[in-house]
Amino acid sequence: MNYTSFKITIENHVATVAFNRPDKANSLHEVAWEEMQDIFETLDQKPEVRVIILAGEGKHFCAGIDLSLLMDIQKFDGINCEARKRETLRKFIFKLQHSITAIERCRKPVLAAIHGACLGGGFDIVTACDMRYASEDAYFAVKEIDYGFVADIGILQRLPKVISSGMAAELAYTGRRVSGAEAAAIGLTNRVFASPEEMLEEVMKVAVHIASKSPLAIRGTKEMLLYSRDHSVADSLNYMAAWNASMLISNDLMEAFSASMSKQEPVFAD
């Protein structure tokens, strides 16, 4: 898996995906957005990958959309039909949305390991991850409001389902910075660590632990958590019953019970 804007390693069933434009604070130009979608769609199909860590090379996690990409929107002015111009712009927004949604749709749990800046589109990206961890030097902000437009690629839809609606509104309206410590206090991140190095070490431990579980059960658990987030309890219970009616009896279930009886660690197939 060779990409120009990302560095990827796979070890112990864990894929580490790192933004790799450190000279640009890991801001994402058009190629990077396209690569990100391809990466998560590809990892979704790799059986040997059970968990994914999303991190950043250099001093920052991700500073969001590269400003050159925003300025490039001016090229749409060359379309002389107003309706077609707006249709093209809408398609462009969908393209960025789909790149982030690929993280959410990936059946493997995605753990964000955040240090330094996590701004704008970077903040959008981590809200699509399953779990978020930060170092004390991390800071978050909904920067779109400071550039005079409504954040349009997922933060306003996902953030209120991660933290309280009132706090999400405060961050969206003000664009103020949230420190690593505050992020943990408001429930944005699971934990905060003293340094990026300590964070990556501990996040890897969590990822390896998850990777030791039944891959089938982990994928089903992610499916259920996402479905329950967007549906009623009754609908979610109905879907859960249908899921386990078809997926409960598996080799993984037998392996787990057998290992428990023999007091050994289960070993699951990919």
Image (cartoon, helix red, strand yellow):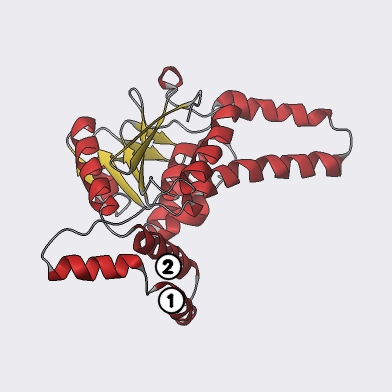
> Is there a contact, CB below 8 Å, between mark 1 and mark 2?
yes
In this rendering, position of residue 229 left or right of residue 214: right
- Name the outermost residue toward the right: 81
Q: Residues within 10 Å of mark 2 (few under 14, many from 20)?
A: some
How far across and how far down the image is residue 8, in percent? 40, 31
How far across and how far down the image is residue 160, in percent? 44, 58
Q: Is residue 117 above or below residue 218?
A: above
- The earlier-in-sequence mark between 1 and 2 is 2
Q: Is residue 265 above or below residue 45?
A: below
Residue on which the image places disc 1:
240
**Disc 1 on helix, strand or loop?**
helix
How far across and how far down the image is residue 198, in percent? 18, 35
Q: Which mark is residue 224?
A: 2
**Disc 2 on helix, strand or loop?**
helix
Q: Determine the residue positioned at 24% across, 41% down.
A: 204
Looking at the rendered structure, the kind of residue marked 2 is: Met
Q: Determine the residue positioned at 75% across, 27% down.
A: 75
For residue 257, what is the image quadrant?
Answer: bottom left
In this rendering, position of residue 36 left or right of residue 257: right
Residues 84 and 33: in front is 33
How far across and how far down the image is residue 233, in percent? 43, 79
For residue 68, what is the image quadrant?
Answer: top right
Residues 105 and 119: in front is 105
